[in-house]
Image (cartoon, rainbow, N blue to C red):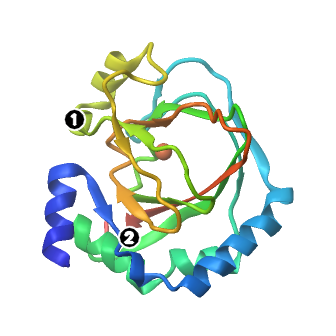
């Protein structure tokens, strides 16, 4: 598994977590936890227009959704040995640790403009807790450009043309190079809510 993960990461900036490494009972617990957390979630609404390059290499932009850091079930997924192994094998880092994770709740009209994650995120995992999520848009061919180059190219395009689709699968995590590859979610146009997980890992040896 290790070699394929590493090669895919280097070539494509993504790492698929084998579906069977996380038990279905843990997914059930996480889904229940999301239900319990939702009433206590807080609105994340960044309204500053345009792309803002940050000193850590990330790029922030407007977005709106609700967020919650989760509870014991989500923590146990984030802290699981299996996920750390995938993160470590893909990125070739030895001490991969989840530094940020949580639930994201999308209501109709919620959105996430093109951005790059916190520079400390060596790999960002995501999946859906509700089925049938629309794919995320991403531009893996811009992975190795500087923050300034990306900001310049995408300045006026919250949802860039010519992007590729990164599937957000139901209860199947996939990792991507979110701090280097610009990505976005167009406004949710269905009438139902969508729930996602994100888990970001960093290497603590550096
Ligand atoms: Fe992101």
Tell me which residue sits at (69%, 67%) in the image: 70
Residue 141 in percent (x, y) is at: 21, 35
Q: Which residue is mark 2?
A: 204
Disc number lying in front (2 or 1): 1
Q: Which of the pair 139/117 is nearer the observer?
A: 139
Who's the residue at 60% across and 86% down the image? 25
Q: Is residue 156 left or right of residue 88?
A: right
For the residue carrying disc 2, how many other residues have a C-alpha within 10 Å: few (<14), some (14-19), or many (20+)? few
Counting from the top left corner in percent of width and height, residue 31 is at 68, 71
Residue 163, above or below 194: above
The one nearer the camera, 188 or 142, is 188
Placement of the N terminus among the 4 image quadrants: bottom left
Residue at 47% across, 36% down:
184
| Disc 2 residue lies near ligand 1 with CB under 8 A | no
Q: Secondary structure at mark 2?
A: loop
Instruction: Relative to 200, say whether 73 is above or below.
Output: below
- Residue 184 in the image: above or below residue 125: above
Sequence-earlier tag: 2 or 1: 1
C-alpha span from label 2 to label 1: 28 Å
The one of 15 and 191 positioned closer to us in this rendering: 191
Q: Which residue is mark 1?
A: 141
**Splitting the image into 4 quarters, where does residue 137 fall?**
top left
């Amino acid at each position: 598994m290790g070699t394929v993960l590493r090669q895919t990461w280097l070539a494509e900036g993504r790492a698929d977590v084998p579906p069977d490494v996380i038990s279905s009972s843990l997914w059930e617990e996480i889904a229940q936890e999301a239900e319990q957390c939702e009433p206590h979630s807080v609105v994340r609404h960044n309204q500053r227009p345009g792309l803002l390059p940050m000193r850590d290499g990330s790029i922030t932009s407007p977005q709106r959704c609700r967020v919650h850091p989760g509870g014991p079930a989500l923590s146990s997924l984030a802290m699981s040995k299996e996920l750390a192994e995938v993160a470590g094998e893909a990125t070739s880092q030895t001490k991969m640790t989840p530094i940020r994770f949580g639930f994201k709740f999308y209501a109709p009209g919620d959105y996430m403009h093109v951005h790059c994650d916190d520079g400390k995120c060596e790999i960002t995992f995501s999946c859906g807790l509700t089925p049938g999520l629309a794919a995320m848009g991403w531009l893996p061919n811009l992975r190795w450009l500087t923050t300034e180059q990306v900001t310049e190219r995408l300045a006026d395009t919250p949802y860039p043309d010519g992007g590729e689709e990164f599937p957000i699968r139901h209860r199947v995590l996939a990792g991507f190079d979110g701090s280097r590859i610009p990505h976005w979610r167009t406004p949710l146009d269905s009438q139902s809510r969508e729930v996602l997980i994100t888990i970001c890992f960093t290497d603590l040896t550096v």
